[in-house]
Image (cartoon, helix red, strand yellow):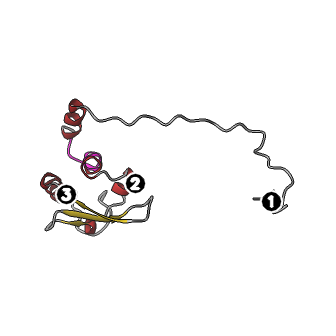
């Protein structure tokens, strides 16, 4: 842009080679890996991983969740995705709803702040 606008005459980045990166293959967790995750001590890290696994949300979306995003009566989670800006409503398995209720009790977080406490 600066070259086009004639702010500078030469792009200083022209001499650099672009780094080529190969896209990594996605893989499915093994049954043993899933057992390890569900066997983790109860806490924030475990909740983040389980919410991500069971909802498909990206890490930053999970971390930014608020308690008000969860509708316990209808077992749904509604949030705005950070990457796309789209509002999504995700059905939650009963197991996850129960885990969230227990996590909220243990974290003594009764406000509407992020799940991290």
Disc 2 vs disc 3: Cβ atoms closer than 8 Å?
no
Label 1 or label 2, whichever comes before in sequence order: 1
State the extent of the magenta-drawn residues as a range.
41-50
Q: Is residue 44 magenta?
A: yes
Is 110 above or below relative to 39? below
Query: How packed is label 1: few (under 14 Cα within 10 Å), some, or many (20 or more)?
Result: few
Q: Is residue 105 left or right of residue 62?
A: left
Q: In screen coordinates, is 86 left or right of 104?
A: right
Between the C-alphas of marks 2 and 3, the distance is: 18 Å
Element marked by disc 2: helix
**Where is the C terminus found, in terms of image quarters?**
bottom left
* Residue in the picture at 45% in, 58% down: 83
User: Which residue is disc 2 drawn over?
Assistant: 60
The answer for how far apart the CA atoms under marks 1 and 2 are is: 36 Å
Q: Kindly state the secondary structure of the residue where label 1 is placed.
A: loop
**Foreground residue, 104 or 24?**
24
Q: Nearer the viewer, mark 1 or mark 3?
A: 1
Q: Quadrant of residue 38?
A: top left
| Contact flag, marks 1 and 3 (Cβ < 8 Å) | no
- 82 inside magenta stretch: no
């Amino acid at each position: 842009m600066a070259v086009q606008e004639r702010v500078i005459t030469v792009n200083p980045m022209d001499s650099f080679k672009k780094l080529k990166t190969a896209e990594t293959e996605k893989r499915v967790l093994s049954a043993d890996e899933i057992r390890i995750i569900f066997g983790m001590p109860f806490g924030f890290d475990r909740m983040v991983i389980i919410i991500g696994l069971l909802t498909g949300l990206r890490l930053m979306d999970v971390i930014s969740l608020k308690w008000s995003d969860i509708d316990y009566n209808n077992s749904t989670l509604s949030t705005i995705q950070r990457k796309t800006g789209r509002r999504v409503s995700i059905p939650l398995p009963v197991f996850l709803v129960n885990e969230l209720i227990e996590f909220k009790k243990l974290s003594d977080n009764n406000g509407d702040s992020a799940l991290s406490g």
